[in-house]
């Protein structure tokens, strides 16, 4: 009886091999589909990074054209500051305007630290600050802010440059400046301080109780013993070339990973 049970319970070798083959085939098929699915997902990455890199090339060209346009604006004819300057600051940024009025030196504030610019480029690296002074503008009927120019750190105290504190009515040529956004990692200024690290026109105006308009006095406004005007530099944040390099580098790296993945699947 036992021998009979053993005889019928045994599975023929060919049948066992066939069953094993079917299981292996199913496992191979599942594994193949899984790897194929992973491969399809992986190909999305280099395609995406390539698209982002190409888009940044267009952004780079746009930014360079915009900088060129703003530089050309600085060469346009000087106009009298319009009465609606508050609403047109963005439109007129970097445009030269003529203003007539009087400074209030008692409310000086500073953008600090700053290096002196020479003809719109970086100077010798001397450190100091830009002196920003309220200016009652007869043309608009309100008080605006004028960046009179650069002074060395030792001359930030107004008492050290009394001869440069222009008194009475004056006519100046200056450049319209738009507010500047705080850089991501720039330190926050001290509350109540009269020093700013970037062109935060609203805060400056609130501090001095003036209209939120800021002009950069040009080089012709410089006076003996006073701030050095002409500190305007046409700058726009332009990181697009770095982004192009980054995205295309990721495209190469992920394409190589995809190639190695598919090569390994073939073995």
Image (cartoon, rainbow, N blue to C red):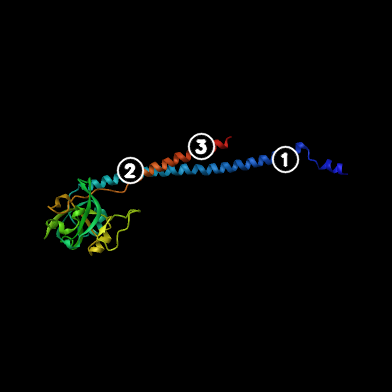
The residue lying furthest to the bottom in this view is: 209
Q: CA distance from mark 2 to mark 1?
A: 64 Å
Q: Are marks 2 and 1 in contact (CB under 8 Å)?
A: no
Label 1 neighbour load within 10 Å: few <14, some 14-19, many 20+: few
Q: Out of 212 and 186, give the one closest to the viewer.
A: 186
The residue lying furthest to the right in this view is: 1
Q: Is residue 149 above or below residue 48?
A: below
Q: CA distance from mark 1 to mark 3?
A: 35 Å
Q: Which residue is mark 1?
A: 19
Residue found at x 27% / y 61%: 203
| Label 1 vs 3, first from the N-terminus | 1
Can you tell which mark lies on residue 217? none
- 193 left or right of 226 in image: right
**Regarding mark 2 in the picture, which secondary structure is present there?**
helix
Q: Quadrant of residue 103?
A: bottom left
| Label 2 vs 1, first from the N-terminus | 1
Q: Which residue is mark 2?
A: 61
- 161 left or right of 22 in image: left
**Regarding mark 3 in the picture, which secondary structure is present there?**
helix
């Amino acid at each position: 009886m036992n021998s009979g049970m053993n005889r019928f319970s045994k599975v023929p070798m060919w049948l066992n091999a066939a069953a094993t083959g079917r299981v292996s085939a199913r496992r191979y098929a599942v594994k193949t589909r899984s790897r194929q699915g992973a491969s399809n997902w992986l190909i999305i990455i280099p395609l995406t990074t390539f698209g982002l890199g190409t888009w940044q090339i267009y952004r780079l060209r746009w930014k360079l054209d915009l900088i060129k346009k703003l530089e050309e604006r600085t060469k346009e004819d000087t106009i009298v500051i319009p009465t609606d300057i508050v609403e047109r600051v963005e439109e007129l940024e970097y445009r030269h305007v003529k203003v007539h009025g009087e400074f209030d030196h008692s409310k000086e504030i500073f953008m600090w630290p700053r290096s002196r610019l020479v003809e719109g480029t970086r100077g010798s690296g001397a450190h100091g600050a830009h002196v920003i002074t309220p200016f009652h503008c007869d043309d608009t009927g309100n008080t605006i802010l004028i960046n009179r120019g650069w002074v060395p750190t030792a001359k930030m105290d107004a008492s050290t440059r009394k001869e440069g504190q222009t008194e009475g009515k004056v006519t100046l040529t200056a450049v319209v400046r738009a507010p500047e956004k705080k850089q991501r990692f720039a330190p926050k200024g001290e509350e109540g301080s009269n020093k700013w690290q970037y062109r935060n026109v609203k805060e400056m105006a609130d501090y001095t109780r003036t209209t939120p308009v800021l002009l950069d006095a040009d080089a012709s406004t410089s006076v003996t013993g006073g701030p050095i005007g002409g500190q305007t530099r046409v700058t726009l944040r332009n990181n697009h070339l770095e982004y192009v390099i980054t995205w295309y580098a990721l495209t190469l790296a992920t394409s190589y990973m995809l190639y190695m993945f598919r090569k390994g699947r073939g073995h």
